Image (cartoon, grey):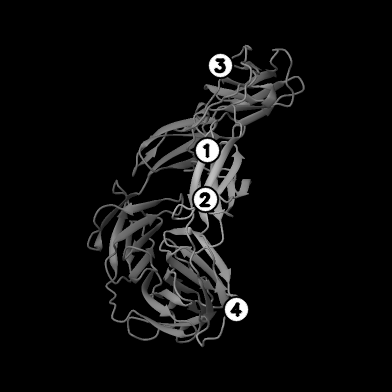
Amino acid sequence: MRWSWVGLWVVVLACAEAPRPVPKKTRWPVDEVAFTVRTVDPTGQPVPGVALVVRRADQGSLISRSGTSDAAGTVRLRVMPGWYVLQAEAPGFVRTLDMDARIAPGSEARLELTLKRAVPFAGHVVDLEGRPVAGARLQLTLSGDEESALSTESDADGRFRIDSVPAGTVKLLAEKDEWSPTRLELETPQPELTVVMGGLGSLRVQVRGPDGKLSSAASAWIFADDEDEDEEHFFELFPEKRSDATVFQKLRAGRYRVSGRYAPASGDCLWTRGIEVQVLPGQQAEATVSFEGVQDVGPWRGVAVDARGNALATGVVKAWLENGSLDDVGMHGRCDVRPGLDGSFALPHVFKAPVSLEWTATHPSMGLLADGPLPAGTGEPVMFRSGIGLLKGRVLRPDGQAQAHFKIHSYSEEDPRGEYEQNVPSSHTYQWVIEAEGFAPALVRAEGRAHEILTVPDVVLDVGRTVHGRVVAEDGKTGVPGQEVELVEVFDLETRWRRRPHKATTNADGHFRFDHVAGRRQFLRVDAKEQGTVLRGLEPDEVSVQLWLVPGAELGGSVT
C-alpha cells in the first residue's frame, strides 16, 4: 500500500460567498535590539580580542553580525529578535559555540561566554620504519562531542599542529590514500605525539567443506567492522580467485568479518559461516572458514497450508536455519524450495531444523509467515499467515467488466482482472481514491485488520457529472482569467496529502469546467495571491458554481 503522510496540521480558512470588510493590515513590531556579549576566561577575567560571529540559527550559514571584544571583553551588537548561534575564537583559547541564544523583542539582551584555555597539541606522523609521512589528514574530535572536529595535515617533514584543543579526552584519526588509518584515544595535554601509520594489507581466505577438503565451489566475502556500531560498511571488492583460496588485496588495517558460503549438491540450500579476522598494516592475513564435521540431517518435510487449511501450491517456501543475517558471525543457512500441487515441500540439505519459514507468492507479490511452533519436519502441515493484513478488491466498469488500467492515490496499477491490494500494517479504517480515465474518482473506505486478508466490495465506476463555474474578483462581477482552480477531497484539507488534486484553469472571462466529478461532497479551492482566495464546498448535486475571491488576511503572533 502506498501511503505518504507528513505530520503537519493544516489551518483551513474558509471564505464566505459575499465580500466582507477586511481589517487593515498591520506589521508586527520587529525592531533591532541591543545585544551585548561579554567574554571571560575560567577565572571570570575578561578576554579582549575575541572574534565573535553571530549567525541566525534558522538561516544556515548566513552571518548576521560580527565583532571583536574590547579591553573589557565586551562585544556590542544590534540584531533582530530570534534564535542565534554564537561562535567565539581567540588565540590561546578553545573555540566556543553557543547553539541556543534566544533574543526576545523589545528589551536589551545580555550574554556571558566563558572561554576554555587551549593546550598545545603537536607531533609528527611516521611510517613503520620511522620515516616521515607527508600529506596525512588528521582529525581530532572531543570526547562526547563528535560533531565538533579540528583538522590539519602533516607537512613535508610529517609534522602537524592543531590549535584550540581543550584539556581532556580526545580521539585522533590519521588517514591517507593507499594507507591504513590510525586511530588513537588519548588525554591532553601531553608531550609531542608520534603517530605511526602503515600501508594496506591483504587477506587470503580458504573454505573447507564438510569432508574437510578445500572446496573450489565455495565462496567467501568480507565485511569491515567500522568503529561506529550503527554503521557497517560493505566492501564491494573484486577479489582474486585462486584454485585453493580467495585473496582480497589493498585492505585497510582493521577487523574484518569473513563469510564463507557452501552450497550442497542440489543448490536449493546455502550454508554460511562467519568468523572475525584481524588485518595488520602491510601484511597478509590468513583465514579458513571450515564446515568440517557439519552433518546434513535433511530432508526436512512439510505441507504448506493457509489459515483455512488450503494447500499453498504455488510460490516459494523460504527457510532460515538460524536467526540473523547469512553473513553474521556463526553458522547460518537458508533453503528456497517450491511446494507441489498439494503444498508438500522438502528442504533437501539442512544442518538443523529451521527456525522460521516464509511462503512467498509469485503473483501477486505477498508473503506469509509460518504461524506457531514448527512441526518435527516429517511431513506435517505448516500453517502460514500474513505478517501484515491485506485488503483485496476489484475495479469494474459500469457494464461489470474489469477495468484493467487505473490509479490508486495517483499511482498507476494494471491488472487484466481489475484486482488490487492494499497493505494493512495495523487494525483501523483505511481509505483510498481510485481513478480511471473517463470515469469519476471513486473513494473507498474499509476496515483493515492486522494479520488478516479481507475482501472489500467491488468498485463500480461511473462517469460522474460535469461542473461549470466562474471565478470573479472582489467586486463580484469581473472574471479572473488564467487562474488555477483545484478540486479536492474533504480529507485533503485535514492533512498534507501528497496526492495531486484535480485542476482546471479559467478562460478569459473566468469560466472553468470539471468533467467526471464524483457524486460526493468535495471542495473547490483558489489561491489568487494578491487578488484573494476562496474555499467553497461543492455539494453532491451541484453542477454550477461561482467562486468569489476575498482578500487574504494577515495572521500575527509570537512563539515563546
Question: Looking at the picture, which amino acid does disc 4 mark?
Answer: Ala
Q: Amino acid at mark 1?
A: Ala
Per the image, the residue denoted by label 1 is 109
Nearer to us of marks 3 and 2 is: 2
Alpha carbon separation for disc pair 1 and 3:
61 Å
Residue 326, image x, y percentages: 38, 67
Q: Which residue is mark 4?
A: 134
Could you tell whether 182 is left or right of 67 in the image?
left
Mark 4 or mark 2, which is nearer to you?
Answer: 2
Q: What's the residue at 43%, 67% (across, down)?
A: 227
Is there a contact, CB below 8 Å, between mark 2 and mark 1?
A: no
User: Marks 1 and 3: which is nearer the front?
Assistant: 1
**Mark 2 or mark 1, which is nearer to you?**
2
Circle 2: residue type: Thr
Q: Identify the residue position indicated by label 2 in the image.
A: 39
320 or 165: nearer the eye?
165
> What is the count of numbered marks?
4
Q: Is residue 440 left or right of residue 280?
A: right
CB atoms at circles 4 and 3 under 8 Å apart? no
